[in-house]
Amino acid sequence: MADNFIQEIIEKDLQTKKYGEKVHTRFPPEPNGYLHIGHAKSICLNFSTAAKYGGKCNLRYDDTNPVKEDVEYVDAIEEDVRWLGFEWDQRLWASDYFEQMYEAAVELIKKGKAFVCDLSGEEIRAYRGTLTEPGKESPYRNRSIEENLRLFEEMKAGRYGDGEKVLRAKIDMASPNINMRDPVIYRIAHASHHNTGDKWCIYPMYDFAHPIEDAIEGITHSICTLEFEDHRPLYDWVLREVGWWPQPPQQIEFARLNLTNTVMSKRYLKALVEEGAVEDWDDPRMPTIAGIRRRGYTPEAVRNFCEAIGVAKANSTVDISLLEHCVREDLKEKVESRNVIFDPIKVIITNYPPGQSELCEIENNAQAPEMGTRQVSFSRELWIDGADFMEEPPKKYFRLFPGNEVRLKGAYFVTCTDFVKNEDGSIKEIHCTYDPETRSGNGFEGRKVKGTIHFVDAATAVPVTVRQFDYLFVENEQGEMVANPDNIKVSTAYAEASLAAAEKGERFQFFRHGYYVADSKLHTSEKPVFNEIVGLKSSWKPAK
């Protein structure tokens, strides 16, 4: 049974044997930047669709523009695809087909379907017309087939400079679809190519190259985003007019992923990197797949998110809180909890023997008892969260304040008896007494307390750097996306000693604070650095 309209098309094709029993998709990134969360949707769709029908999915690099591409991006793309849990059938390059593309262009010239044009890029745009007015034919449109073949061969031989001539398809300058108004299909670019070196100085345009690549590889269903819908007539025209493929592939468009508070333009993200507004492409604030991986998101959560949003025919914007919800849901029974103290305040247990300490047993994950317990040190001096004490509390504040009793999680009941302030009025330390009869696990059934707070032993606490993130962009009152200057907060917290041994990339729940990951670049045992993955509370609500 089909789950979406793309699968409905495929299942109909399988029933009619349009491509026999074959389903072959491809993911065709341009290696000119790092992939982002929007690409993750396309990756999941192409690879999982092929897998559903026992088919194949190629990874094909669209490397038809030699100026913008870099091997760094190739390596990053492959890491991203594998991290998401997929493996390609073949790794291919558009540039491997340059010879066939050239021959296809010659075929169009011979059929009178393409011509060499001397107009400049600016003149071509001026001749193109508008959405309401037809275009004007190029004065070079009616060159003879022989002249076009000669000029195109001279273009290939390097006789002309960049922009001096182009090859255009001869279609219809009055077409209501501007993409069909004699589009450029080859340009001159005297630039070395990472794969073909200096063999070529003419390069095919994407709209010409893409259908030919699909056809050569035997792709059946060329799944792409909605902005290519207006280009589909050109895709079909190229395959039909070249005429070499009796059963050509078909292009199917789906809505691209748009997220609130997120900019997913590769060009804009590249500018952030180059301007130093972020650390790099894998900055945890970036919506790149490398960024969310470093942030601590899991591939399972990203795949679940892509499945949850489905495949639509119309563009819309998804609330980023749904992605965060999927991350939270995936982590909640996977990671162990640790006590980490933010904005620390010293607590002194005045009736606890000086120099004495003991170990308390605490569960690693309250939602997954099978994850067992760990031992946490307890002694006379502790650290608690700054938010867990108030001098003059409001109603329904059940944490520590003068005269109030709370449970220290995994340890004892303590009662605040006094506190000391610094000269600036901030709290320096809190004095408490503890009740030795109330130790957790001893079966104490006496009085009840409403508040439970966590702690770390001051004698064994490890200082850790905590990086909390907000969105790089926020929507202003006019509905425009603007840079958010307050997108990161770096602070020092005190953690239980075991966190010093955390491995890079290891995830934890910081009890009552959220999910965190040991940073894959900055974290060391001497200087632990943890990135906030996602908070504990979700703002996402499922549709009723």
Image (tube, grey):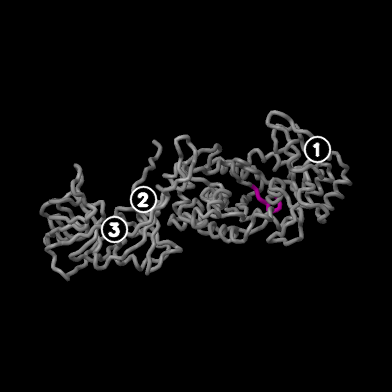
N-term-proximal mark, 2 vs 3:
3
- Residue type highlighted by circle 3: Ile
- Residue type highlighted by circle 2: Gly
- Identify the image quadrant of residue 141: top right
Residue 535: assigned label = 2
Residue drawn at (76%, 53%), measured in percent from left and top? 202
* Residue 231 coordinates in the image, percent (x, y): 67, 40
Q: Is mark 3 in CB contact (under 8 Å) with mark 1?
A: no
Q: Which residue matches tag 3?
A: 341
- Residue type highlighted by circle 1: Ser
* Residue 217 included in the magenta stretch of the image: yes
Residue 147 visible from this viewpoint: yes
* Residue 506 coordinates in the image, percent (x, y): 40, 62
Q: Nearer the viewer, mark 1 or mark 2?
A: 1
Q: Nearer the viewer, residue 80 or 523?
A: 523
* Residue 328 coordinates in the image, percent (x, y): 38, 51
